[in-house]
């Protein structure tokens, strides 16, 4: 399973912000801290705001803050909001889909592993990453 660049960036942005979830972060500060291209970063910040993870304050001293607690934001929600869960349903060997009459040699093993990964994403919050010093910087 590979996350898309968009999912990776979204996870990096929010996990970085979770280091101090009460702080306000400008797009420029986030760009400098985690080195995501500015145009991509701005689009993602807008998307993450529309998804309800963060909120923006406009003006000279504006920036982005969490709109809810990091303990209430789960990694599965982030991936789902930017890519949809279909993005992690691909074949581990790179096939577009499984044929009904022929499944790849890894099918059963991959199904079990994929379910474990999904469960981990559903049960891991940004707060969990922060308290264990696991961030995506």
Image (cartoon, rainbow, N blue to C red):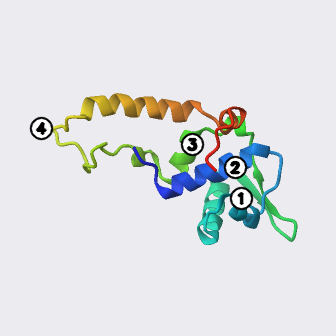
Percent across and percent down for residue 110 are: 32, 33
Q: Residue furthest left?
A: 101
Dot 1 falls on a residue whose secondary structure is helix
Locate residue 25: give its quadrant.
bottom right
Q: State which tag comes first along the sequence, 2 or 4.
A: 2
As measured in the structure, the alpha-carbon distance from the residue carrying label 1 to the one carrying label 3 is: 23 Å
Q: State which tag comes first along the sequence, 4 or 1.
A: 1
As measured in the structure, the alpha-carbon distance from the residue carrying label 1 to the one carrying label 2 is: 8 Å
As measured in the structure, the alpha-carbon distance from the residue carrying label 2 to the one carrying label 3 is: 17 Å
Residue placed under numbered mark 3 in the picture: 77
As measured in the structure, the alpha-carbon distance from the residue carrying label 3 to the one carrying label 4 is: 33 Å
* Placement of 67 over or under 124, stated as above or below: below
Residue placed under numbered mark 1 in the picture: 33
* Placement of 97 over or under 119, stated as above or below: below
- Residue 27 is left or right of residue 137, and the answer is right
Dot 4 falls on a residue whose secondary structure is loop
Q: Do the residues labelled 1 and 2 touch (CB within 8 Å)?
A: yes
Q: Quadrant of the N terminus?
A: top left
* Placement of 67 over or under 59, stated as above or below: above
Q: Tell me if residue 92 can be seen.
A: yes
Q: State which tag comes first along the sequence, 1 or 3.
A: 1
**What's the residue at 61%, 68% (across, down)?**
37
């Amino acid at each position: 399973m590979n996350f898309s660049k968009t999912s990776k960036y979204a996870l990096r942005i929010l996990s970085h912000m979770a280091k101090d979830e009460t702080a306000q972060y400008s797009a420029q500060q986030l760009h400098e801290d985690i080195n995501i291209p500015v145009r991509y970063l701005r689009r993602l910040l807008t998307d993450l705001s529309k998804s309800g993870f963060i909120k923006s304050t406009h003006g000279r001293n504006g920036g982005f803050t969490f709109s809810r607690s990091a303990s209430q934001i789960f990694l599965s929600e982030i991936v789902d909001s930017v890519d949809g869960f279909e993005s992690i349903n691909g074949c581990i060997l790179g096939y577009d889909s499984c044929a009904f009459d022929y499944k790849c040699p890894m099918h059963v093993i991959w199904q079990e592993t994929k379910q474990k990964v999904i469960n981990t994403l559903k049960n891991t919050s940004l707060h969990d990453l922060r308290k264990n010093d696991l961030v995506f910087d």
